[in-house]
Amino acid sequence: MKVLQVSTENNSGGASRSAYRLHQTLLEQNIDSSMRVLTHQTANSRVISGRAPRTYTQKIKDKTSQLLWRYSTRNWRTDNPILHSFGRDSAGIVDELNQSSADVLNLHWISKLLSIQDVGALRKPIVWTVHDMWPFCGAEHVTPDVPDARFRQGYLPNNRPERERGPDLNMQTWLLKRNAWSKQQFKFVCPSKWMASCVAQSVLFGDLKMSIDVIPNPLDTIHTWRPIDKDIARRKIGLDPHRRYVIAGSGGGMPTIKGDDLLPELMTRLNSQRSDPVELIIFGRYGAATHERWGCRVHWMGPVQDDAVMATLYSAGDVMIVPSRQDNLPNTAIEAMACGTPVVAFNLGGLPDIVDHGRSGWLAVPMDLEGLSKGITWLLSDGHRLNDMSVAARDSAVKKFSAAIVAERYLSVYADAIASRHS
């Protein structure tokens, strides 16, 4: 079986890293996997990048189309700050994909690589790993998961958010998807049960031939994501081995969705009840914003690209905090657990797929900071319990996310996709 992973990038965000890890996992299982990306961040002969060659006339046509699109959408406004992709950009690789020797295409995050029409023109069996909400929404990559969400009702003139202005680009994008994909066959893989429920409830895919499988992102729990002795890990990054540390990641381009703004108050609440202050390790940011007031000492680690360094950081912490307001299956949570660090988070999105409450971590009522603080305090108040939770977190990660287990489940979906297309 030959599998082609199709992703805009291969190592510059959670979705692209997950795609690349799946590619590597399949290779390790002796499956013929390759990647087709727009830009790549790793030196790998099986990862092909770039746009298809364009003639001078095509380049002029593309440039003119882009200028007209920008002009026609100049008055559009939205209060949703998360990235929007309108699905008009294409790297021109549809013919290449259709003529490739791949038995199945595994789509991932495809903004600017494949246009909406491109996806409809694919003639290979398609498995689509849903890393965010864009496949079944309009142009939004993330939208609030509420009962009257437009992806559940359809994008209608009378259900547009009040604070959107100008042309309804989300409705236009949704309608474009509905028309272009009406005869396409998809097999969806969702990393979490929550994302699978969103896909199943979407109006866009309600009438299409599709199936949905819940398969988590793979993780190398043998060589990369494994516990490091805590004292050794702390010495490597210059931390006091006798203090208590919680660790958190920065939300990058989605700080509100990832709950970055909740951390200062959370740490203030936590330490107001303790005689021995807990310190915070944050990766992904270089320092505090001028308006932030932290109730603890913060160790700023900056952006980290090296997995071995990340495994050291996770191992150095006593507890991992994931304060997301909405999340699919955050890599940071499964990586931390594989390194033996229990996770404290809100009970929402894909976090219940990761954390077994009271056994491998703690799940608080959504948006209840006191509940998060209580969970951290409960974990840190008993050394034996924390050690047991650490072992349970590691065991749970190995059983759920090990590369070989995930690969086997993907191979089953690929086989079904090939059989369905041929039939």
Image: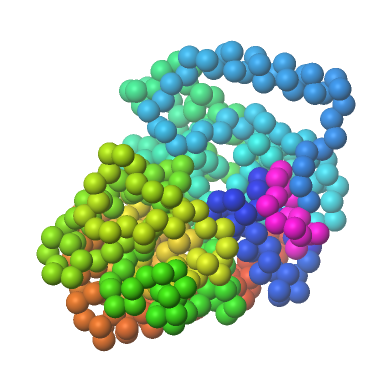
Foreground pick, 179 / 385:
385
Q: Residue at x 43, y 50 (%)?
A: 285
Q: Position of residue 396 (x, y in %)?
A: 43, 77
Q: Main secondary structure of the magenta part?
A: loop
Q: Residue at x 32, y 84 (%)?
A: 388
Foreground pick, 46 / 247:
247
Q: Is residue 178 left or right of residue 356?
A: right
Q: Position of residue 313 (x, y in %)?
A: 44, 68
Give yes or no for residue 45 being in the magenta stretch.
yes
Q: Is residue 62 left or right of residue 242?
A: right
Q: Residue at x 62, y 39 (%)?
A: 111
Q: Is residue 255 visible?
A: yes
> Quarter-wise, where is residue 246 in the image?
bottom left
Q: Is residue 363 visible?
A: no
Q: Is residue 137 left or right of residue 344?
A: right
Q: Position of residue 345 (x, y in %)?
A: 31, 61
Tell me the quarter of the image containing the N terminus: bottom right
Q: How is the image coloured?
A: rainbow
Above or below, 337 against 197 in this view is below
> Quarter-wise, where is residue 115 in the image?
top right
Q: Position of residue 417 (x, y in %)?
A: 68, 58
Foreground pick, 201 / 286:
286
> Quarter-wise, where is residue 63 in the image?
top right
Q: Is residue 186 left or right of residue 167?
A: right
| Residue numbers of the magenta segment | 33-47
Give yes or no for residue 238 being in the magenta stretch.
no
Q: Residue at x 52, y 58 (%)?
A: 304
Tell me the quarter of the image containing the C terminus: bottom right
